[in-house]
Image: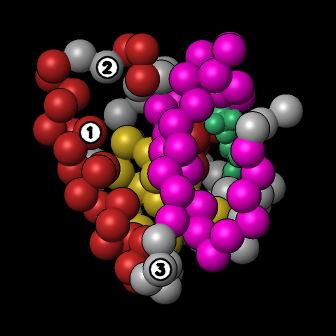
Amino acid sequence: MSDCIFCKIAEGEIPTAKVYEDDQIVCFHDADPQAPVHVLIIPKKHIPSMDDLTEEDATLVGHIMVKIKDIARDLGLTNGYRVVNNCGEDGFQTVKHLHFHILGKRKMTWPPG
Ligand code: 5GP
Ligand code: ZN
């Protein structure tokens, strides 16, 4: 999607240091980290939110879930981490492109806002 910031990151239009990339997904550091380690993992496909997932996306979302643990390990999060998805207005979602936060090495910021 042309006006989506995460699509632009996925397509390399906005240069971003990527932690992981393959043909389906990209992982990169959050611009405003809420924990010592804070990365975002997104599908390259523009899906606005969890609410927009269909059965067709099940393999893609499964792939994201499997990669989260590999990325967490590669980032040194061997003692655990949080995975967060914000969905919609009341879920505090600000960027309308599906993403999962991976937060690690503590500093809990919950509840939000
Ligand atoms: P949400 O509240 O939608 O779940 O989280 C969106 C996240 O994206 C926020 O943590 C915010 O800091 C991050 N973010 C927004 N714009 C950019 C950007 O242009 N680059 C990066 N790396 N992160 C961004
Ligand atoms: Zn997008």
Up/down of 88 relative to 32, above or below: above
Q: Secondary structure at mark 2?
A: loop
In the picture, the quarter occupied by the C terminus is: top right
Q: Could you tell me residue 6's position as x and y percent?
A: 57, 40
Q: Is residue 106 visible?
A: yes
Magenta span of residues: 81-110
* Left or right relative to 87: residue 34: right
The residue lying furthest to the right in this view is 113
Distance between mark 1 and mark 2 Cα atoms: 9 Å
Q: Residue at x 18, y 31 (%)?
A: 58
Name the residue rendered at 49%, 51% in the picture.
Answer: 83
Judge the density around disc 3: few (<14), some (14-19), many (≥20) Cα neighbours within 10 Å.
Answer: few
Mark 3 lies on a secondary structure that is loop
Q: Which sits earlier in the primary sequence, circle 2 or circle 3?
A: 2
Q: Can residue 89 be found in the magenta stretch?
A: yes
Task: Please say if 106 is above or below 64.
Answer: below
Q: Residues within 10 Å of mark 1 (few under 14, many from 20)?
A: some
Left or right of 112: which side holds 99?
left
First in sequence, mark 1 or 2: give its number: 2
Disc number at residue 53? 2
What is the magenta segment's predominant secondary structure? loop
- The residue beneath circle 1 is 61
Looking at the rendered structure, the kind of residue marked 2 is Leu
- Image point (26%, 39%), residue name: 61
Which image quadrant is residue 31 in? bottom right
Q: Secondary structure at mark 1?
A: helix
Residue carrying label 3: 79
**Would you say the residues marked 3 and 1 are in contact, meaning their CB atoms lie under 8 Å apart?**
no
Which of pointers 3 and 1 indicates the residue nearer the eye? 3
Q: Looking at numbered disc 3 in the image, what kind of residue is underneath it?
A: Asn
Task: Please state if 54 lies on the left or on the right of 5 as rendered.
Answer: left
